[in-house]
């Protein structure tokens, strides 16, 4: 299957895109994690991967969205993005996850990518603003992979995304990416209305559309309109995990997840320190769904200094890892509230209702499922997770 997948990539992706993902993301990404391992032995925590929400505005209105898409759109400008990325690069980082809102609504998004040819950017997008011209520019740059969100068929997509004709518009953006030979991903927030996408037939469909990797993540019940009826049961989460492990051996498409290690034990990227989040307002948050902060990217001499000296982030990692291997926001919202109150953390939303929303949450299951671990069955995924994406001692 590895050879079939490699052949697909050689046939379908631009050579420059292949080089950039192999070098900027592959080689330099591994180096970034190794530097992180050395830092944490010295008690210095700066994540090897930063996730940055560059803009709050979006053209869709998804169920359960936690971003202030209804409020006036805010974005991190080019100068601040360059400063942030350059500071992270100085400490070995080369990979950045770009989120929104809708990132391609950012007026300087292509300039950001062009300013850092030595980095690799994964853009979480609905795909609707990826015109042929945008896709051509991304091909020229080579250092960007669009991760396009698809939530189901036309009917389900319209319901989940709060607009009409979402599916067809998203597929049009995906086709622009395929025609311009980009490395393409598709992400699905798996919930009660689209769990049928957890199927071999769906992955075969993605392969036929020119998609090179799929990311299945389970729906998080958070935000101003949490839509708890969409949440998966523990059995369904287990089904998603089992499906990913099985399909990794069967089909020539990469399957990404960030919530289980090589042994099938749950983990949280925030609790392990692998990643933290920057909001569209420059706030440094534990993760995208925990919208509270003590510091911003404008504090201190550098974001490295600010993050490594943050007692708020340190306590969040320690408390979360001590409580669960899963999502502390879902399982123990009371602990999140306790930390927010303890540090007097600022509500980083425009709506200024995050604490009330937090207090209204009911504890529920996440990916932590003791006694039902499903280990990685493919040697390559098992090796990669064991060495470059695992607990880093957080749960010991």
Image (cartoon, rainbow, N blue to C red):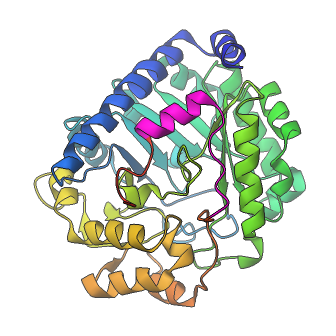
Q: Nearer the viewer, residue 100 or 290?
A: 290
Relative image position of residue 375 (x, y in whole percent)? 62, 45
The quadrant of the image that shows the C terminus is bottom left
For the record, the magenta segment spans: 371-388
* Residue at the image position 25 percent from the left and 34 percent from the top: 92
Q: Which of 205 and 376 is in front in this view?
A: 376
Q: Report which quarter residue 94 is drawn in.
A: top left
Relative image position of residue 189 (x, y in whole percent)? 69, 56
Say whether residue 284 is visible: yes
Is 69 covered by the magenta stretch? no
Relative image position of residue 209 (x, y in whole percent)? 79, 28
Is 387 covered by the magenta stretch? yes
Q: In this view, does 165 lie above or below 71?
A: above
* Residue at the image position 63 percent from the left and 78 percent from the top: 364
Q: Which of 311 and 322 is in front in this view?
A: 322
In the displayed structure image, the side of residue 192 where residue 173 appears, left or right? left
Q: In this view, does 113 lie above or below 288?
A: above
Q: Report which quarter residue 243 is drawn in.
A: top right
Q: Nearer the viewer, residue 390 or 335?
A: 390
């Amino acid at each position: 299957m590895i050879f079939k997948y490699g052949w697909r990539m050689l046939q379908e992706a631009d050579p420059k895109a292949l080089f950039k993902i192999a070098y900027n993301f592959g080689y330099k990404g591994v180096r970034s994690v190794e530097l992180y391992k050395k830092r944490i032995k010295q008690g210095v925590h700066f994540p090897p991967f930063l996730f940055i929400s560059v803009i709050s505005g979006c053209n869709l209105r998804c169920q359960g969205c936690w971003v202030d898409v209804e409020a006036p759109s805010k974005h991190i400008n080019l100068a601040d993005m360059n400063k942030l990325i350059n500071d992270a690069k100085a400490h070995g980082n080369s990979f950045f996850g770009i989120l929104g809102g809708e990132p391609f609504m950012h007026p300087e998004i292509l300039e950001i990518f062009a300013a850092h040819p030595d980095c690799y950017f994964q853009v979480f997008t609905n795909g609707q603003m990826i015109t042929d011209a945008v896709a051509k520019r991304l091909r020229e740059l080579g250092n960007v992979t669009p991760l396009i969100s698809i939530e189901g068929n036309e009917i389900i997509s319209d319901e989940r995304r709060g607009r009409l004709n979402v599916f067809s518009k998203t597929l049009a953006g995906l086709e622009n990416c395929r025609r311009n030979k980009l490395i393409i991903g598709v992400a699905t927030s798996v919930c009660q209305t689209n769990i049928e996408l957890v199927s071999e037939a769906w992955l075969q469909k993605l392969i036929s559309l020119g998609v090179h990797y799929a990311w299945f993540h389970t729906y998080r019940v958070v935000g101003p309109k949490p839509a708890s009826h969409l949440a998966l049961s523990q059995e369904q989460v287990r089904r998603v995990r089992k499906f990913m492990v099985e399909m990794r051996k069967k089909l020539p498409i990469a399957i990404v997840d960030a919530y289980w290690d090589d042994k099938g034990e749950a983990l949280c990227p925030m609790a392990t320190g692998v990643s933290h989040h920057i909001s569209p307002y420059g706030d440094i948050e534990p993760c995208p769904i925990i919208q509270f902060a003590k510091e911003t990217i404008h504090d201190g001499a550098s974001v490295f200094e600010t993050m490594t000296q943050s007692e708020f982030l340190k306590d969040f990692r320690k408390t979360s890892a001590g409580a669960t291997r899963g999502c502390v926001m879902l399982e123990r919202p009371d602990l999140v509230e306790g930390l927010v109150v303890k540090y007097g953390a600022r509500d980083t939303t425009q709506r200024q209702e995050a604490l009330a929303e937090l207090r209204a949450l009911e504890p529920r299951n996440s990916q932590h499922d003791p006694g039902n671990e499903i280990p990685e069955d493919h040697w390559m995924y098992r090796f990669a997770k064991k060495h470059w994406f695992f607990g880093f001692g957080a749960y010991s």
